[in-house]
Amino acid sequence: MSKSSLLSGVTVIDLSRVLAGPFATMTLANLGARVIKVEIPGTGDDSRAFGPFHNGKSLYFASINCNKESIALNLKNADDRIVFEKLLEKADVLVENYRPGTMEKLGYGWETLHVKFPHLIYGAASGFGDSGPYSKRAAYDMVVQGMGGVLSLTGYPDQPPARVGISIGDITAGLYLTIGLNAALYNRTVTKVGSKIDIAMLDCQVAILEDAIPAYDKTGEIPGPLGTRHPSIAPFQSFQAKDASIIIAAGNDHLFTLMTEALGRTDLATDERFKTNELRHENIALLQKEMEMTLGTKLVAEWLDALNEKGVPCGPINDIPHVIADPQVMARNMIIEVNDPVIGKVKTSGNPVKVVGASDETLLRPSPELDADRAAILAEFMGVSK
């Protein structure tokens, strides 16, 4: 394989906009699928109007829509509906992230499409899914971060809630949608029939709460924000060194002992207050004070060398320029380049799904201008030239 082509031959019709759906279709495109964005004439995907901009083009839109084609269709227009249905005849997957009921009003709900195109896999992402009392409500990332409990666990105690620094509500929905669509593609190889994948952003936030729900259920204690601390493992957080903060994650007794050796504080390993993880967790404030007394004597870089030599999980807190320059990130092709005709050359995130034996794409097809691929798509699917 010359590049990642696990989904080569799969055609995705993408009605989605902004982030949850486009993130899923970007992931599918990264795996080799062909993605055709069907956009609203005149304005296109909402995120085309989101800043920041460079040379008048949205960097937000550009980052999520590489390797895709674009055609503008008004699904209330009879001629455009004919084109859309021709696309669906040959497509494998349809993705949309409208509020439930919108596609039904257009005459393209799952029940209708499944009868007409039984091979078609239908992926829908919305705030609350197809069922339940909130189904028809609107939602954005911040709404589900709050409702799903994530916001209650983020930030520092006795401080106002802190948003997770990325749109984790949309992104987790996009990832779960991708998982569901790939499972449906496999299932179709067996049944020859498509499925509908119904993804709710709120569901996905609840799904990533780790052990918070069973812990509350059995202890009655309501989890809350802990800053960088782990709710049950210690030491497993950021600590202040001489020049900056450092992450140290000594997740078991053996690693804790190795950490004390790296710090030159073997006394901590024999201290009765810190002998087990449970005791370290109970006495984390005392342990942090002891550790920072020592960590404050040297630079982060010096401690990283000492801890890594002992095999203790640790790391710096990188800002974006340091992420881009990180040698491990670079070695894994996680910073790649797009040569956009409007923006120019621009760095973006690479594909984290590495396929052994396949080369990584390091130069992506830029995100399309609105309706840029109309002529080619019409020629291919309609046999006409316009």
Image (cartoon, grey):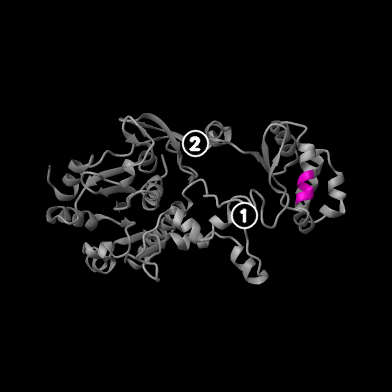
Residue type, label 1: Pro
Q: Earlier in the sequence, mark 2 or mark 1?
A: 1
Distance (Cα) linking label 2 and label 1? 34 Å
Residue 333 is labelled as 2
Q: Amino acid at mark 2?
A: Asn
Res. 175 in view: no
Residue located beneath label 1 in the image: 225
Q: Nearer the viewer, residue 299 or 5?
A: 299
Residue 302 in which image quadrant:
top right
Closer to the camera in the image, 365 or 218: 218
| 244 lies left or right of 380 | right
**Is residue 350 toward the left or the right of residue 238 in the image?**
left
Q: Residues within 10 Å of mark 1 (few under 14, many from 20)?
A: many
Q: Seen in the image, is 140 located left or right of residue 261?
A: left
Instruction: Mark yes or no: residue 73 visible.
Output: yes
Circle 2: element type: loop
* Label 2 vs label 1, nearer the camera: 1
User: Which residue does the image show at 64% across and 48% down from the upper left?
Assistant: 228
Q: Are marks 2 and 1 in contact (CB under 8 Å)?
A: no
Residue 319's disc number: none
Q: Which residues are magenta?
A: 285-289
Location of residue 34 in the rendering, given as x and y in whole percent from the top left corner: 32, 47
Residue closest to the eye, 25 or 96: 96
